[in-house]
């Protein structure tokens, strides 16, 4: 059985990728929007819900970019199973205050060179580049 399945979305605008900045265990972490898959929820449904909660956006899931299996988190030393999707959105981003995060758009190169982005996120970006999506 998969542990702690988490769905993340890569959103592209003007050749840059949206990232979320938040604190996890007193660490400043940059990651893609998304979160945990709840009971009786598919990873795709979870991502659609999370994008709406975190960014107030509707999204369309285009394809899976990276699914590395169950890993040990760099940030909290817990097992998790991330799945990264390329998604498209419409509307304007609005982050509700209770989400406790900020958003930014970074180039693929900026993401690949940041220390506070986990390796699975970087692999998803590399796959995005290989597919010539950005």
Image: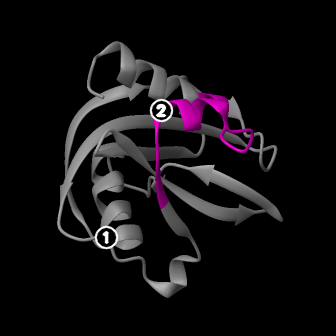
Horizontal side, residue 60 vs residue 121: left or right:
left
Sort mark 1 into few (<14), some (14-19) or many (20+) by Cα contacts within 10 Å.
Answer: some
The magenta stretch spans which residues?
104-120
Q: Is residue 8 above or below residue 27?
A: above
**Where, by quadrant of the figure, is residue 26 drawn?**
bottom right
Disc 2 and disc 1 in contact, CB within 8 angstroms = no
Q: Is 113 colored magenta in this rendering?
A: yes
Sort mark 2 into few (<14), some (14-19) or many (20+) by Cα contacts within 10 Å.
Answer: some
Residue where numbered disc 2 is placed: 108
Residue where numbered disc 1 is placed: 93
Horizontal side, residue 28 vs residue 101: left or right:
right
Which label number is shown at residue 22? none
Q: Is 116 colored magenta in this rendering?
A: yes
Q: Residue furthest top?
A: 130
Q: Residue at x 65, y 29 (%)?
A: 119
Q: Position of residue 77 (x, y in %)?
A: 81, 43
> Mark 2 or 1, which is nearer the eye?
2
Q: Is residue 101 above or below residue 132?
A: below
Q: Residue at x 57, y 37 (%)?
A: 110
């Amino acid at each position: 059985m998969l542990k702690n399945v988490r769905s993340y979305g890569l959103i592209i605008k003007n050749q840059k990728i949206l990232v979320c900045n938040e604190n996890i265990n007193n660490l400043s972490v940059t990651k893609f929007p998304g979160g945990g898959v709840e009971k009786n929820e598919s990873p795709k449904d979870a991502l659609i819900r999370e994008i709406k909660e975190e960014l107030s956006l509707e999204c369309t899931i285009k394809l899976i970019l990276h699914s590395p299996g169950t890993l040990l988190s760099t940030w909290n030393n817990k097992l998790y199973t991330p799945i990264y999707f390329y998604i498209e959105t419409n509307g304007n981003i609005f982050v509700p205050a209770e989400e406790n995060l900020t958003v930014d758009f970074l180039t693929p190169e900026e993401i690949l060179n940041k220390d506070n982005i986990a390796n699975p996120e970087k692999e998803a970006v590399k796959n995005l580049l290989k597919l010539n999506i950005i």
